Image: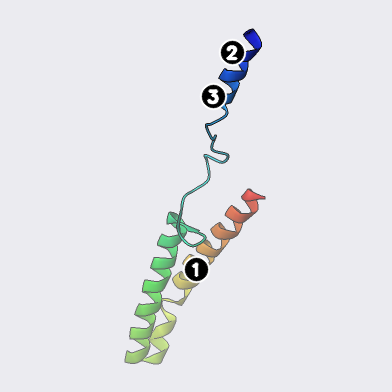
C-alpha cells in the first residue's frame, strides 16, 4: 500500500519539466542576443553614415570605419563566446 502511494507521488512529480540552462541569454534574432543585436544595429548605422559620406567625398567614408569594425567584431565575438559556453 505504501509502495502504491509513493509510486503515485513520483508519477505526479515526473510531469513537470525543469529548465536546463536558466542563465542562457534569450535569442532575439537568429543566433544573436539583444546585446549582439544592438552592436549590429550600431555597426549598420555607421555603415549607412559611411555610404552617405562616400557620396559626398570618397575619403570621408574612412571616418566611421574603425567603429564599424569594432562593433562588428564585438557582435561576432560575443556570438562565438556564447556558442563556446553551450558546449
Q: Crowding near pointer 2: few (<14 within 10 Å), some, many (20+)?
A: few
At x 63%, y 8%, the residue is 2
Closer to viewer: mark 1 or mark 2: 2
In the image, is residue 66 above or below residue 6? Answer: below
User: Residue 40's quadrant in the figure?
Assistant: bottom left
Q: Position of residue 41 (x, y in %)?
A: 39, 67
Question: Percent from the top left, x then y, of residue 13?
Answer: 55, 25
Height in image: 5 above or below 57?
above
> Distance from label 2 to label 3 (Cα)?
11 Å
Query: What residue would you read off at disc 3?
Result: 12
The label on residue 58 is: none
In the figure, 22 relative to 15: above or below?
A: below
Q: Is residue 32 left or right of residue 53?
A: right
Q: How far apart, in angstroms, are the residues tagged by discs 1 and 3?
A: 49 Å
Q: Residue at x 67, y 50 (%)?
A: 87
The residue identified by callout 1 is: 72
| SS type, badge 2 | helix
Q: Answer yes or no: do the residues labelled 1 and 3 have beta carbons within 8 Å? A: no
- The dot on residue 5 is 2
Of the residues under marks 1 and 2, which one precedes in the sequence? 2
In the picture, which quadrant includes the N terminus? top right
Residue 5, by quadrant, is top right
Identify the mark nearer the N-term, 1 or 3: 3
Amino acid at each position: 500500500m505504501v509502495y502504491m502511494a509513493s509510486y503515485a507521488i513520483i508519477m505526479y512529480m515526473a510531469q513537470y519539466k525543469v529548465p536546463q540552462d536558466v542563465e542562457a541569454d534569450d535569442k532575439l534574432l537568429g543566433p544573436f542576443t539583444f546585446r549582439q543585436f544592438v552592436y549590429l544595429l550600431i555597426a549598420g548605422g555607421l555603415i549607412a553614415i559611411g555610404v552617405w559620406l562616400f557620396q559626398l567625398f570618397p575619403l570621408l567614408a574612412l571616418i566611421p570605419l574603425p567603429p564599424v569594425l569594432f562593433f562588428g567584431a564585438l557582435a561576432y565575438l560575443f556570438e562565438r563566446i556564447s556558442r563556446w559556453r553551450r558546449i
